[in-house]
Image (cartoon, rainbow, N blue to C red):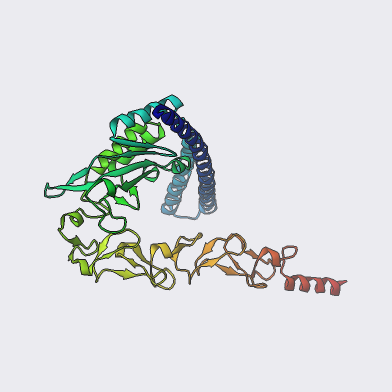
């Protein structure tokens, strides 16, 4: 019966890997297309610059100083050198392809290896392994018990092409251990929202996932759970040892009564460093706050949008939408149609060649605005 369950799961995993390969191929194709568009844009820029410089040299070669000509020649050489650089990266990308799909037999064997290694394994619509007690040494070399965890391989995330840190979910088994979560989802220094930060182990974990070496993936995850990196944890280990809390912004020790948790990154912050976003009204640390480029009001990063034309970060009050292509725009990058008033991005605006005013494509007839077209018709009638 157990072998039947292992085979059923192996079949599900094999189907998930097949879907994963298709998803990764679509993602890779989309990336290559976008990259080529960027390459063609860069290539056109360098060709235009080279042509412009060449025309300058040709036009002023007799009357210009030798220093001017030398500078222009050097600039021309630079622009020409950039052309092969633009073409080298796409050539490399074309040879890229998703990793091969692991065969059914390998997946079946990997599942059985996991069953032999872990004290308890659950096989249903996903693969879940139960760890022994997770014990980590703190900075003072004292053991801290975090309890028993579930390591789950999420098949939906696997199909969607996520890496190991998006495919492996960690849960605390409070029914199997005396350790407990401090509050909410704070269950381990390197876990946030069920996601594990693999740190330096992420590359090996991703490779194991891509190749179908699930036993290695689970053992890497189990090993990472038993390590503590003081440099960049989601939560300091002192939260479990009673050593107090440290404000990540100013570095001062913080009492429980004055402690806040950043809504975005979960860092501990004190009263003085806690910032409130004007839009969502949530508390954030200084690193997760940013000023709107237009109105200079401070918001959290999640409440700011990036202008698709210039990249500036703006709040909802200072952002606009191109009514032709739905691009997000800042107040410096939008144009208003002189006829209907629709907001437009630089790529969607059109100019009447007669009056040189900005219009949307729907307000132009035969390439001209209604006023200029009417004036032109009147002139034709008068001449007739």
Q: Is residue 282 left or right of residue 342?
A: left
Camera-side residue of 46 and 253: 253
Farthest-out residue, top: 105
Farthest-out residue, right: 384
Q: Position of residue 325 (x, y in %)?
A: 60, 59
Relative to 163, residue 303 above or below: below
Quadrant of residue 181 in the image?
bottom left
* Residue found 44% across the figure and 71% down from its top: 294
Count of numbered badges drawn on the protein:
0
* Residue found 58% across the figure and 61% down from its top: 326
On-image quarter of the C terminus: bottom right
Camera-side residue of 166 and 318: 166
Q: Position of residue 96 (x, y in %)?
A: 47, 34
Q: Is residue 136 left or right of residue 234?
A: left
Camera-side residue of 88 and 22: 22
Q: Is residue 49 left or right of residue 284?
A: right
Q: Position of residue 310 (x, y in %)?
A: 48, 61
Q: Position of residue 204 (x, y in %)?
A: 32, 36
On-image quarter of the N terminus: top left
Quadrant of residue 375 in the image?
bottom right
Relative to 284, residue 139 above or below: above
* Residue found 11% across the figure and 49% down from its top: 140
Relative to 79, residue 353 above or below: below
Q: Is residue 103 visible?
A: no
Q: Is residue 109 visible?
A: yes
* Residue found 43% across the figure and 43% down from its top: 162
């Amino acid at each position: 019966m157990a072998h039947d369950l292992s085979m059923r799961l192996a079949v599900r995993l094999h189907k998930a890997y097949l879907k994963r390969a298709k998803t990764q191929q679509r993602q890779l194709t989309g990336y290559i297309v976008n990259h080529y568009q960027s390459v063609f844009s860069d290539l056109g820029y360098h060709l235009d610059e080279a042509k412009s410089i060449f025309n300058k040299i040709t036009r002023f070669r007799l009357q210009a100083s030798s220093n001017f000509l030398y500078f222009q020649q050097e600039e021309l050489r630079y622009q020409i050198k950039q052309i092969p650089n633009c073409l080298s990266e796409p050539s490399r990308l074309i040879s890229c392809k998703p990793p091969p799909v692991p065969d059914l037999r390998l997946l079946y064997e990997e599942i059985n290896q996991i069953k032999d290694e872990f004290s308890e394994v659950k096989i249903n619509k996903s693969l879940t392994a139960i760890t022994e007690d997770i014990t980590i040494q703190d900075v003072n070399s004292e053991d801290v018990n975090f309890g028993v965890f579930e390591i789950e391989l999420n098949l939906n995330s696997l199909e969607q092409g996520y890496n190991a840190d998006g495919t492996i979910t960690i849960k605390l088994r409070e029914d199997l251990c005396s350790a407990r979560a401090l509050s909410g989802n704070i269950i381990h220094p390197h876990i946030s929202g069920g996601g594990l930060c693999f740190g330096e182990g992420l590359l090996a974990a991703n490779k194991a996932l891509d190749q179908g070496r699930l036993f290695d993936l689970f053992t890497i995850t189990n090993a990472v759970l038993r390590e503590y990196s003081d440099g960049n944890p989601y939560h300091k280990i002192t939260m479990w040892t009673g050593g107090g809390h440290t404000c990540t912004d100013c570095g001062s020790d913080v009492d429980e009564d004055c402690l806040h948790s950043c809504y975005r990154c979960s860092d501990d912050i004190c009263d003085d460093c806690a910032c409130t976003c004007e839009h969502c009204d949530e508390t954030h640390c200084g690193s997760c706050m940013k000023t709107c480029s237009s109105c200079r009001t401070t918001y959290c990063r999640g409440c700011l949008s990036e202008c698709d034309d210039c990249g500036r970060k703006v709040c909802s009050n200072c952002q606009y939408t191109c009514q032709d292509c739905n691009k997000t725009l800042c107040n410096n990058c939008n144009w208003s149609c002189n006829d209907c008033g629709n907001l437009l991005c630089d790529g969607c605006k059109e100019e009447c060649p007669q009056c040189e005013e900005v219009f949307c494509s729907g307000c132009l007839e035969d390439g001209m605005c209604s006023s200029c077209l009417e004036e032109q018709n009147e002139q034709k009638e008068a001449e007739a």
